[in-house]
Image: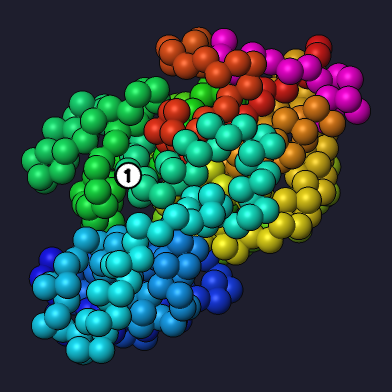
Amino acid sequence: MTLRPHHVAMLATAIGDLSRLGSPADALLYQFFRRHPSMGPEDRAFVTEGVFAWLRRRRSLEQLAGTTHPSKLALAVAVRERGYSLRDLEPVISKADGEWVRAFKARLDTELPPAVAADVPDWLWERLGEAYGDEERTELTRAWLAPAPLDLRINPLKTTREQVREQLAASGIAAEPTPYSPLGLRIAGRPSLGRHPLQLEGAIEVQDEGSQLVGYLVAPKRSDMVVDFCAGAGGKTLLLGALMRSQGRLYAFDVVDKRLANLKPRLKRSGLSNVHPQLIASERDTKVKRLAGKIDRVLVDAPCTGFGTLRRNPDLKWRQSETGPAELVVKQRAILAAAATMVKPGGRLVYATCSVLPEENEAIVDAFLATHPAFALGDAAAELARAGIALDTGPTLKLLPHRHHCDGFYAAVLERSK
């Protein structure tokens, strides 16, 4: 993209606006664009890519720049992350800024402390080392520095994967089957699909492959009663409904009305008739208590740090505090215990997070099993194999971006005895 005089200035303004990160970065960026309606598609693309490059590499950029000033960080992003040369920049920046860029480029070979070079907070760097060891930690944090591809899930009630590939190709979009999910397609880059006919007619949904695999662990039968306990905007709900062939009964529970409101247009497009969104006040809501011992399958996609998604949500590593995981653990334990009350004898509970921290994953499941003798750990690899998915990460599903090229996910299959 050819730089215009306003590009660097607009990126600097966006960085300044987002620097406190009081809300998710994508929401803040949406608000930024609403405040600047005159920006065209090319301007928005430049700012979006620049902002997310800054978020991914914020710590090392600030260290090398020697400042947190947005205008200097915008120049640093343009040079180091976007690959613009001084010759590209000189027509659109001041002489003083040109001199600053020369000095910045001279510092690019400076050796940085490991956590700074990896662009994670010190506490997270240490925690990852404890959990994974030095080599795996290095590979994981390096993977987080690259943008994620765009994964789609096809709606098997409306189309096939090959049909979607052909229709996307006709639109100039190349898509490849995901390595594991039978319903997944992967697209390089970030083409706009919001108004694509496939999206509008409910033939596709944007959903990471790791998230799709969690649905296959739930493995609902057509006649089952199923609860998606933390449904959010409903990505996994829609997958479960499709796996049920729009039969049985599927409850989508959430404590935030806005999330369920976002599910409704997606649900309408999907063609599913077996999904019932339900707003609950808490995990101990009376709607939950009424279903005690009645549900065949329960999915708990628990609120978590979200560190498995740092390729696409890099702001999370700067928004989460060192004490955040411990606070989430309390919530995760309470939600899992409440969800378990709904599972009927012989039923199944799947506990999942998009975290890579053991305290949010294995530790939660171990503590649950120690206090719920009616439940036993199932075999995630065997369940995937039954669905024709050749992926074995052991008894539990453990996905990491540098190994499996999808978001980081953890999931455990918990079977209730008859």
Locate residue 331 relative to residue 90 in the image: left or right. right
Q: Does residue 45 lie above or below 326 as drawn?
A: below
Provide residue 71's location: percent of width, then percent of height.
35, 82
The C terminus lies in quadrant: top right
Query: Crowding near pointer 1: few (<14 within 10 Å), some, many (20+)?
Result: some
Q: In front here: 387 or 30?
A: 30
The magenta region covers 368-382
Which residue is painted at 61% across and 48% down in the image?
A: 125
Q: Does residue 416 lie above or below 68 as drawn?
A: above
Residue type, label 1: Leu
Q: What residue did someone put label 1 on?
A: 150
Provide residue 241's location: percent of width, then percent of height.
49, 34
Which residue is painted at 44% across and 82% down in the image?
A: 69
User: Mark 1: which secondary structure?
Assistant: strand
Q: Is residue 151 visible?
A: yes
Provide residue 143's location: percent of width, then percent of height.
42, 41
Which residue is painted at 64% across and 50% down in the image?
A: 124
329 drawn magenta? no
Locate residue 37 relative to residue 2 in the image: left or right. right
Locate residue 6 relative to residue 150 in the image: left or right. left
The N terminus lies in quadrant: bottom left
Q: Does residue 324 lie above or below 341 as drawn?
A: below
Q: How is the image coloured?
A: rainbow
Which residue is painted at 45% across and 61% down in the image?
A: 60
Choose top left, top right, bottom left or bottom right for residue 105.
bottom left
